[in-house]
Amino acid sequence: MSDSTQRQRPETPEGEQPDPQQFRKSVTRRGGGDPASRGRTTISDGVVEKIAGLAARDVPGVHAMGSGISRTFGAMRDRVPGTASKSVTRGVKAEVGEVQTALDLEIVVNYGVSISDVARGVRENVVAAVERMTGLEVVEVNIVVSDVKLPDEEDEEPESRLQ
């Protein structure tokens, strides 16, 4: 080591241990600290909508997402070759801020289920999935039940498309 980089060690009386704090070199950090905190992560509304849509569909008693009109148009679009498959964001609207998000969902429930239980399950599942995957705080999940699927009604979309 050269004289300019070598630290001067203070003299200590014989028998005493030197203070280890005196020997530490100062470390200059470049780039502003922890690498994980450098930069910004932005999560788009569409990402949160997809997560919420998939989480809502996983709840027993949820037959479909979206209003009758959006499901009809979606079913027609799905039949056109070369277009994207059924949108997982149908019936979901997200407003995403820097640290929080709010969601509006439109669902169709199966006849005979408790709507309040289904809504509670949807809220719990959506909040858990969105917060776990995005780190955003979900401040509200508003649910509109737009229809009830009766046992004898035909599906607007074939069951195979719901997978």
Image (cartoon, grey):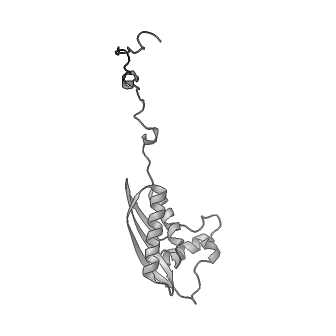
Q: Residue furthest bottom?
A: 152
Instruction: Residue 20 in the image: state x and y as whole percent.
Output: 39, 25
Residue at image coords 41%, 74%: 143
Is 2 placed above or below 59 here? above
The image shows residue 38 at horizontal and vertical percentages of: 43, 40
Q: Check the picture and name the quadrant holding the C terminus.
A: bottom right
For the residue pair 12 and 34, the one nearer the viewer reads as 12
Rendered residue at 44%/65% (across/down): 127
Q: Going 42% across and 14% down the picture, which residue do you hit?
A: 6
153 or 122: nearer the viewer: 122
Regarding residue 100, the answer to whether it shows in the image is yes
Residue 67 visible in the displayed image = no
Query: How many numbered marks are there?
Result: 0
| Residue most extreme to the front | 15
Closest to the observer, 56 or 152:
56
- Image location (x, y in percent) of residue 45: 44, 59
Quarter of the image where one finds residue 11: top left
Identified at 44% across, 76% down, the residue is: 119
Residue 100 percent coordinates (x, y): 37, 58
